[in-house]
Image: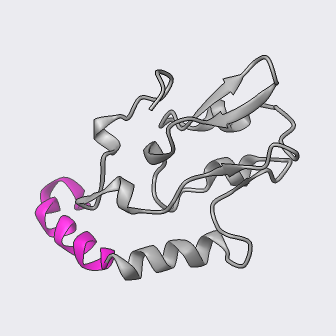
Amino acid sequence: MNEEQKKDPKFAKFHGIDREEFQWNPKINEDKCMGCGMCVTSCIRGVYKYDYENKKSKVVNPTNCMVACQTCSNLCQAQAIDFADENDTPRNKAQRIVRDFKLIAKAKKDLEERKESLKL
């Protein structure tokens, strides 16, 4: 890990599972990236930094990324950010993560444990 990378401990787990277990990391196609910086300035988890010399965004803290979040990709006008492989979609990949890691059961348990703070 270089000095620019700073793993934030509050993002170390996702539903009680080590975040590094999940293959959910943004990839930037540098040929498409137009250097607008929208991903850098919109991501509140510090996943990106900006290379001012090359005028390109860079992924520096991939495991800070919220599993299944695609905000940066949705905002990218150049369609330079993706989370899935060539023969997949981010939605399908996210759904597989929920299924494979049995996250619905974990979410239901979390709802019950946090009932007082989450109820209407």
Instruction: Using residue 89 as the reference point, say whether residue 11 is left or right of it.
Output: left
Residue drawn where x is 87% and y is 45% of the image:
31
Is 110 magenta? The answer is yes
Q: Give the residue furthest to the front.
A: 1
Instruction: Using residue 24 as the reference point, say whether residue 37 is left or right of it.
Output: right
13 relative to 38, above or below: below
- Place residue 43 in its image quadrant: top right
Q: Nearer the viewer, residue 113 or 82?
A: 82
Q: Nearer the viewer, residue 120 or 88?
A: 88
41 relative to 80, above or below: above
Q: Position of residue 18 (x, y in %)?
A: 29, 56
Q: Quadrant of the C terminus?
A: bottom left
Residue drawn where x is 79% and y is 17% of the image:
53
* The magenta segment: 102-120
User: How was this image coloured?
Assistant: one colour
Instruction: Using residue 81 as the reference point, say whether residue 5 is left or right of it.
Output: left
112 relative to 52, above or below: below
The secondary structure that dominates the magenta segment is helix
- Place residue 7 in its image quadrant: top left
